[in-house]
């Protein structure tokens, strides 16, 4: 197996539990650029002492990801099975049914891998060349540990292109176009084939549990609603009406199907969020609760200022359709946006509209998306409940 040695003092983060090494932190071996992306390697510190086993991609900024601190480890199906069982043990303690994020990348010791579980159907994302090369062992381990009826490998990801990988989805076994999950007693229709990411946003489940009650007694607007998770949970908690806004027709169709399955009524509008918010304002519509839960608007550090203004514009437009004393649930899944920044954005936009702001609660990703203590990027989701009056 190839040896990769770190430059002096560059091993500190790995010793502290970090799993990434950047291309300028290694002593590049001969013919480094010609290495097959994803090649397994032994990782050595500057004194040639072993740090562990990982995989390497000479063509990416994060060129090395550590898999284990065992330099003699054989990364085979049995190794994957042990990691999967460790991840499964946590989720089995937390959730009464097998519906959750089973693997959250580095936080579960499996860099480049995300798995969402829908009972006997799995939605898998492989984002790195190293994990792609290890896919046969991974699939064997999944069959051993979970015996799934079907596996959807969702490959339509920009990061795969960066890693030199194709972006074509794969289906193994029986994977339905749509699957049903139960969240807090409600039945949701989750689009898998052609759905967003891995199908359902499990990371907001705990926040929906805590925050849905704020919608009681008033009208709710769910911006970037996807399949209606916030809207239907709000109706369940006692909202008098709910409107879903999203650009995806299949997502809104899933929201309507879920509403019907639960004897609820939801209105849906398809289009870009800012355009639809302007329409609602022009119509004079007002809502007691507004949820703004967009996709990541700051994907890279260099996009920070532009993304920050996008968050500001969205939340300003949301406040303009809120009642005189309303609740705004403002979310961000951008790692590069700090919670304090989101709070400052809300305060600034409220002041522009001559309104007062109170922060009532804060939320983060659910426990099936654990945070790796040495990798701040794994702490990404922010949710603020604010009173705007």
Image (tube, grey):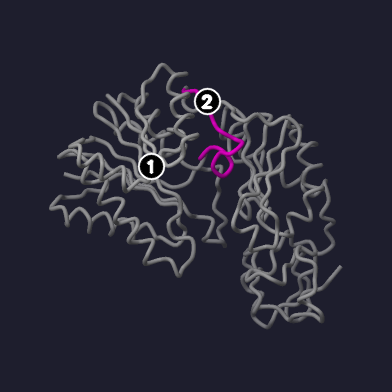
284 with respect to 295 (left or right): left
- Rendering quarter of residue 280: top left
Judging depth in this view, the residue of 263 and 365 nearest the camera is 263
Residue that mark 2 sits on: 182
Q: Is residue 245 magenta?
A: no
Residue that mark 1 sits on: 271
Q: What are the residue bounds of the magenta stretch? A: 186-201
Q: Residue 29: x and y, percent?
A: 79, 80
Residue 71 position (above or below residue 318): below
Observer-side mark, 2 or 1, equals 1
Could you say whether the residue bearing mark 2 is in a helix, strand or loop?
A: strand
Residue 196 position (above or below residue 159): above
Q: Quadrant of the N terminus?
A: bottom right
- Rendering quarter of residue 278: top left
Mark 2 vs 1: CB contact within 8 A? no
Q: Residue 95: x and y, percent?
A: 56, 32
Q: Residue at x 28, y 58 (%)?
A: 345
């Amino acid at each position: 197996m190839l040896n990769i040695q770190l430059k002096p003092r560059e091993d500190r983060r790995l010793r502290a539990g970090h799993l990434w090494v950047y291309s300028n932190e290694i002593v590049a071996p001969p013919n480094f650029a010609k290495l097959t992306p994803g090649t397994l390697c032994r990782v050595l510190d500057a004194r040639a002492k072993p740090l562990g086993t990982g995989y390497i991609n000479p063509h990416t900024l994060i060129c090395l990801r550590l898999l284990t601190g065992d330099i003699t480890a054989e990364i085979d199906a049995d190794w994957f099975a042990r990691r999967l069982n460790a991840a499964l043990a946590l989720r089995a303690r937390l959730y009464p049914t097998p519906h959750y994020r089973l693997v959250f990348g580095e936080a579960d010791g499996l860099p480049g891998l995300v798995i969402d579980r829908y009972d006997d159907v799995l939605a898998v994302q492989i984002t790195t060349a190293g994990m792609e090369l290890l896919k046969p062992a991974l699939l064997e381990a999944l069959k051993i540990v979970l015996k799934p009826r079907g596996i959807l490998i969702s490959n339509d990801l920009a990061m795969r292109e960066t890693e030199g990988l194709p972006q074509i989805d794969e289906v193994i076994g029986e994977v339905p176009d749509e699957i049903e999950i139960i969240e807090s007693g409600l039945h949701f229709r989750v689009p898998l084939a052609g759905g967003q990411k891995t199908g359902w946003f499990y990371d907001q489940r705990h926040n929906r549990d805590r925050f849905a009650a704020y919608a009681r007694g008033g009208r709710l607007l769910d911006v970037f609603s996807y399949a209606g998770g916030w809207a239907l949970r709000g109706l369940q908690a006692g909202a008098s009406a709910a409107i879903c806004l999203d650009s995806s027709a299949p997502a809104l169709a899933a929201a309507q199907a879920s509403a019907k399955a639960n004897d609820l009524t939801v209105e849906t509008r398809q289009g870009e969020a800012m355009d639809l918010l302007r329409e609602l304002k022009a119509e004079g519509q007002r809502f007691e609760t507004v949820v703004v839960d967009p996709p990541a608007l700051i994907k890279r550090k260099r996009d920070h200022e532009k993304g920050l203004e996008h968050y500001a514009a969205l939340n300003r437009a949301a406040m303009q359709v809120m009642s005189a004393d309303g609740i705004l649930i403002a979310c961000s899944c951008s790692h590069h946006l700090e919670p304090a920044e989101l709070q400052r954005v809300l305060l600034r936009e409220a002041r522009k509209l001559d309104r007062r702001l109170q922060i009532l609660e804060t939320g983060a990703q659910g426990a099936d998306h654990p945070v790796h203590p040495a990798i701040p990027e794994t702490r990404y989701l922010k949710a603020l409940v604010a009173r705007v009056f």
